[in-house]
Image (cartoon, grey):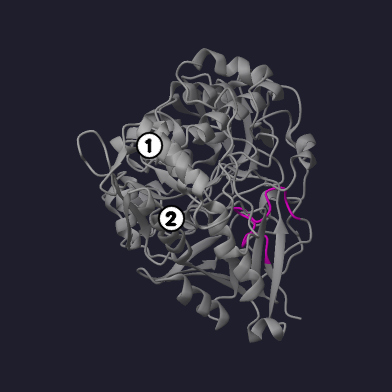
Amino acid sequence: MSVNFFHKMLRASAVCGLIGAGGFAVAESQHGIAMYGEPALPPDFVSLPYADPDAPKGGYIATGEVGSFDSLNPYILKGGTPWQLRFLGVESLMGRNWDEPFSLYGLLAESIEVGENREWVEFTLRPEARFSDGSPVTVEDVMWSYETLGTVGHPRYHGVWGKIDKMEQTGERKIKFTFNAEDRELALLVGMRPILKKAQWDGKDFTESGLDVIPITSAPYTITDFEAGRFVELTRDPDYWGKDVPIRRGTQNLDTIRLEFFGDETAFFEAFKGGILNSMREFNASKWETQYDFPAISAGEVVKEEIPHGRPTGITGFVMNTRKDMFADWRVREALIQAFNFEFINETLTGSTQPRITSYFSNSILGMDHGPAEGRVLEFLKPFADQVPPGVIEGYSLPVSDGSERNRDNIRSALALLEEAGWTVQDGVLKNASGEPFEFEILLGQGQVENTTIANLYVETLNRLGITATVTSIDGPQYRERTDNFDFDMTVYRRGVSLSPGNEQYAYWGSEAADQPGSRNYMGVKSPAIDAMIGKLLNSESQEDFRAATKALDRLLTAGRYVIPFYEFNISRLAHAKELKHPEYIPIYGDWIEWQPDVWYWLDE
């Protein structure tokens, strides 16, 4: 499971033991469930290891981002919503512990039970669970939520729903799901779906709701104020039903969470410097070192922190839409990767302080080896040897330039590959055999200053190859609509991956998702080999097979040459008001979903 704004891994060896060995546990009315082995936390755990159960309540956090929004319903395809609402504004039957690769503990559900092979899962709801309006969370609400999201909700929810053979109420507070597919992750994924209030939607069109209806949920925060495209404010419910549930103790401490939106990165940063925002993540290492010296920092009112983490890099870069004929040939994609002068761009923008992503799961125990495939990895890939691009089995690494602006050797390699693929320079313009010029658009969201700079530097290089590339920046809702419908040639792609890759991999790069509007398969890849590796990692019964399947998947994605990678982020850089605190213990996922603001608190000094 993952979201699209963080990347990278600290050191894999530190988490090997946490992933656990052996097969899967069969639970009988247990308090939690792990993908492998047993959950790390015992039935009587007090709080998450990275939360302070005695943290004070009060204070506020104000964060921002570049972009806009025109909806407050993140559970449907229509409209653009603040991504945070998917996590701050709703609850599920089970909740994550981000100090384990993939384990869940009871939230709305007090217990979970699974079949011997996880062919079914049953949850028992907590009798005290309540929506923010005081009404109880019922099995009927759960069943309605699953069916509605699975059929007319955002496509991200459809995959799991399609693998549910039967959903039934088995007791006053019990609900059971029986699956129609061999997929041992399903028991966990079903526990993580949003639960909404059925009665709220009587007589309303769920699929068309935007700013007119704020979904009622059982979450600790409710939306209390907003202005379309400008800000959303959430307030902690003092009567929140779940404050004594173990997974909630020491979390949701801040009274107010405010999400501000800005037209560009300059306005965003100035708002932080001016005190409109009191917490900010910085992704540019050079800017972190040179521009975070304003008066509030000098006076100690704002502090800088670097937060380590232990997760894979994920992928960030320019993705090529292989639905377009020009990007269908791997040689063309490799040529465009050769032409991307990362070393020069990195020096220009960060002073060469940011290392490059080398594969989707790089810097982790799940990352591919760059030499020839061996052992179980080779065994898994061999049946597809005649279908996969060069480098998958033989070994593949990204090209490295000499760091100069000219990048001569890589440009020569790019031209040779393009010629092999049928593109030649004619009168200074790269054309195919039909005389059609090589032209494409790099689509960006408005206000993406750094990405625009990278794109413009890249365009200059492409011009030397006879390629005409145009950089187009559009506002948030337009960008969302076009990317949801795969209406682009090349765009920025950011996809985080975890230490427990699972069914979400189908949504990112599975064949079925390639034709699903709203899916994250921006590249449009349809590969039987990729589908097979996802299947293998989902149904592996040993750590050896799980890791081998993920390493094989990493090879297929990286050597598939779908994305031109940018930087990896091996730490998170956070600047924040001195009153904003967090517990000293940092989970293995670091600054990840449900860490800030969930376990942060306000302490006047």
Q: Amino acid at mark 2?
A: Tyr
Could one spot residue 511 in this view of the protein?
Answer: yes
Q: Is residue 37 above or below residue 262?
A: above
x, y percent for residue 292: 64, 76
Q: Residue furthest top?
A: 383
Q: Name which quarter of the figure residue 54 lies in.
A: bottom right
Q: Amino acid at mark 1?
A: Leu
x, y percent for residue 314: 57, 44
Q: Which residue is mark 1?
A: 418
Residue lying at 61% horizontally and 15% vertically, measured from the top left: 379
Tell me how far mark 1 sits from mark 2, CA to CA: 17 Å
Q: Which residues are magenta?
A: 586-600
Relative to the observer, which residue lies in front, 100 or 291?
291
x, y percent for residue 457: 44, 59
Q: Which residue is mark 2?
A: 458
Q: Is residue 254 left or right of residue 227?
A: right
Q: Is residue 455 above or below residue 312?
A: below
Q: Is residue 64 above or below residue 45?
A: below
Residue lying at 51% horizontally and 51% vertically, measured from the top left: 407
Which callout, 1 or 2, points at the residue further toward the start of the chain?
1
Q: Is residue 212 left or right of residue 316?
A: left
x, y percent for residue 52: 76, 60
Residue lying at 55% horizontally and 83% vertically, measured from the top left: 274
